[in-house]
Image (tube, grey):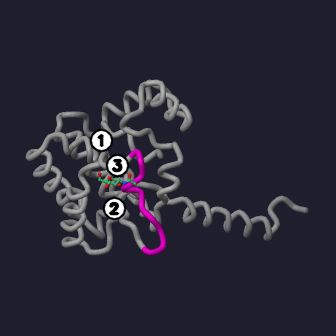
Amino acid sequence: MAAASPFSVVFVVVISILGSTGYAQLCPNFYSKSCPKVFSTVESVVESAVSKEPRMGASLGCDGSILLDDTSSFTGEKTAGPNNNSVTGFEVVDAIKAEVEKVCPGVVSCTDILAIAARDSVVKLRGPDWDVKLGRRDSKTASLSAANSGVIPPPTANLTQLINRFAARGLSAKDMVALSGSIICWKNMIIW
Ligand SMILES: *[C@@H]1O[C@H](CO)[C@@H](O)[C@H](O)[C@H]1NC(C)=O
C-alpha cells in the first residue's frame, strides 16, 4: 500500500483533531474573553482574607473535590479523617466563588479559583509570583472512602509517614519540603 493513501491521510487528520481537542491545554488567558475580571476578583477577596488572618494564606489552594458537600448520592471528603477539624478556609473560598459568580456566572471552575487563590495567597505573604495556568474542570463527585484510604497524610503524620506518602506519589522529600513550604498545605494538594 502506498504510504500516502487517502485512507492514511484521513486517519492522520482524525488523530490530529482528537489530539487537539482531547487533551485540554491549560493556559493563563483561558478566561480572558469569558471572565476578564477573574484575577482581580479573586485577588481582592484573598487580599481582604489574608490581611485579616495571615494564616488563611496557608489554607487556600487545597484540592477542589474537598469543597463538595455531602449529597444524596455521595458523602464528601470534608469529614474524612485527615481533613476533619483540620482543613480550614472554606468560607473564604465560598466568598471568592460568590464574587466570581457575580461578575461571570457559571464560567470559572472552582479548581481554577483555588489555583489562583493559592498563588495570590503566596504573593500576599511575600512569596514568589507565577502565572497560573487555567482551564481545569471541576469534579462533580467526591469520595469519603478514597479520602480515608491512606493516600492523604493526616495532620498527625510524623516525618517518616509524610516522606512515605509523598514517595508513594513519586515525589521526593525535597519535593515535599518545596511544596509544603510554598503552599503550606500538604493535605489535599492538587496532586492527591
Ligand atoms: C468530625 O468532627 C466533628 C466535630 O469535632 C465530630 O463531631 C465528628 O464526629 C467528626 N467526624 C468524623 C467522621 O470523625
- Which of the two discs, 1 and 2, sits closer to the camera? 2
Q: Position of residue 52 (x, y in %)?
A: 8, 47
**Image: magenta residue range:** 72-82
Residue 61 is a magenta residue: no
Residue 88 screen position, x and y as percent: 26, 49
**The disc labelled 2 sits on which kind of residue?**
Cys
Q: Circle 2 sits in a helix, a strand or a loop, which is it? A: helix
Quadrant for the N terminus in the image = bottom right
Q: Which mark is residue 74?
A: none
User: In the image, is 13 to the left or to the right of 171?
Assistant: right
* Residue 101 picture quarter: bottom left
Q: Main secondary structure of the magenta part?
A: loop
Please state which of residues 25 and 165 is positioned toward the viewer in this rendering. Answer: 165
| Mark earlier in primary sequence (1, 2) | 2
Mark 3 within 8 Å of ligand 1, using the beta carbon: no
In the image: residue 86, left or right of residue 100: right
Q: Which residue is mark 3?
A: 62
How far from the left and from the top, in percent, is residue 117? Answer: 26, 51
> How many dots with numbers?
3
Q: Which residue occupies 17% across, 34% down?
A: 126
Q: Secondary structure at mark 1?
A: loop
Q: Which residue is mark 1?
A: 130
Q: Position of residue 177 (x, y in %)?
A: 38, 27
Badge 3, how many Cα within 10 Å: few under 14, some, many 20+?
many
Q: On the image, which quarter does residue 5 sit in?
A: bottom right
User: Disc number at residue 110?
Assistant: 2
